[in-house]
Image: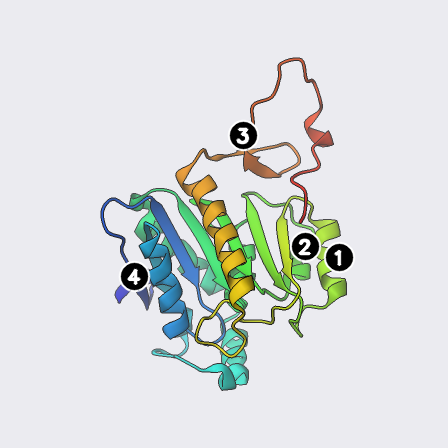
Amino acid sequence: MIEVTANEVKFSAYRADPEGTPKGAVVVLQDVFGVNADIRKIADGFAAAGYVAVAPSLFDKVKSNIELDASADAEGRSLTAELGTEWPIEAIQATVDTVKDAGKVALVGYSWGGYLAYLAANKVKGLACAIGYHADGLLEGVMEKRRIPTLIHFAEQDPLVSEEDRIQFRARRPDVSAFSYPEAARGFGYAAGPAYNAEAAEKAQERTLFWISQYVVGQGPVLLKNAGAYAQAKTEKKSKKKADDDMGPPVD
């Protein structure tokens, strides 16, 4: 555990370091259960893949040492409501600043953390890309164009995100790469959790690692006039297609 400070508030963070020179860094954002064993294991997985991984304990501002299980969803959501989003965004910025010496930084969030990752993508400086798992509340900021490459994993059995929500999100944000997992429920990526779905978890992790590799290890994004940020592709000089005609990457 390390200590980080955001706006004069100190909070803890779990840090996992890779063997050898890091490829970059991943900031892992907790769900409503805090930085528990599931989140620490996810951070360890990113470290094993070659990245410095840090998971800030965002609940520390109101209550420290919070590690909840799946039965304490109401308590966790009460803490997120008390926190709001302003200070968590400041804490995410402070956490990113602690790992920027490792290289480019990706942001990966789960549930509430997925929602924060989506918000932080347009507010936090120094990010190469953002990824959110089974995040609810995305339609609240759906009209804001993405400033960095953003990837979203939807669980189709998520009671907090309806099919209509997913349809609306995809229609309004063609600059976001979004994947749906038909048999998956909220929390499908937690190996020790009750909703774990091995097939969906493996597919999502493969896509996440590819995304991070592309934008953290590979060539950086280029910001287009329509605010869609994608890896720069080679184009023929003869092509004079206007940037406004770019419809972004296909949505799977």
Secondary structure under tag 2 reads: loop
Do callouts 1 and 2 mark residues in contact (Cβ within 8 Å)? Answer: yes
Closest to the observer: 184 or 218? 184
Q: Nearer the viewer, mark 1 or mark 2?
A: 1
Q: Which residue is labeled 1 in the image?
A: 168
Nearest to N terminus: mark 3 or mark 1: 1
Q: Which residue is labeled 4 in the image?
A: 15
Nearest to N terminus: mark 4 or mark 3: 4
Seen in the image, is 104 located left or right of residue 123?
Answer: left
Q: Quadrant of the N terminus?
A: bottom left
User: Few, some or many C-alpha atoms within 10 Å of disc 2 (few <14, some 14-19, many ≥20)?
Assistant: some
Please state the horizontal and vertical placement of residue 134, each as a whole percent of the image. 58, 65
Closest to the observer: 39 or 61? 39
Nearest to N terminus: mark 1 or mark 2: 2
Q: Residue at x 42, y 60 (%)?
A: 28
Q: What is the spatial separation of the Cα atoms under label 3 and label 1, in whole angstroms? A: 28 Å
Identified by mark 1, the residue type is Gln
Q: What is the spatial separation of the Cα atoms under label 4 and label 1, in whole angstroms? A: 36 Å
Q: Which residue is labeled 3 in the image?
A: 232
Please state the horizontal and vertical placement of residue 189, each as a whole percent of the image. 50, 67
**Residue 251 can be seen, yes or no:** yes
Q: What is the spatial separation of the Cα atoms under label 3 and label 2, in whole angstroms? A: 24 Å
Q: Residue at x 51, y 86 (%)?
A: 71
Nearest to N terminus: mark 4 or mark 2: 4
Q: Which residue is labeled 2 in the image?
A: 142
Secondary structure under tag 4 reads: strand
Do callouts 3 and 2 mark residues in contact (Cβ within 8 Å)? Answer: no
Q: Nearer the viewer, mark 3 or mark 2?
A: 3
Identified by mark 2, the residue type is Val
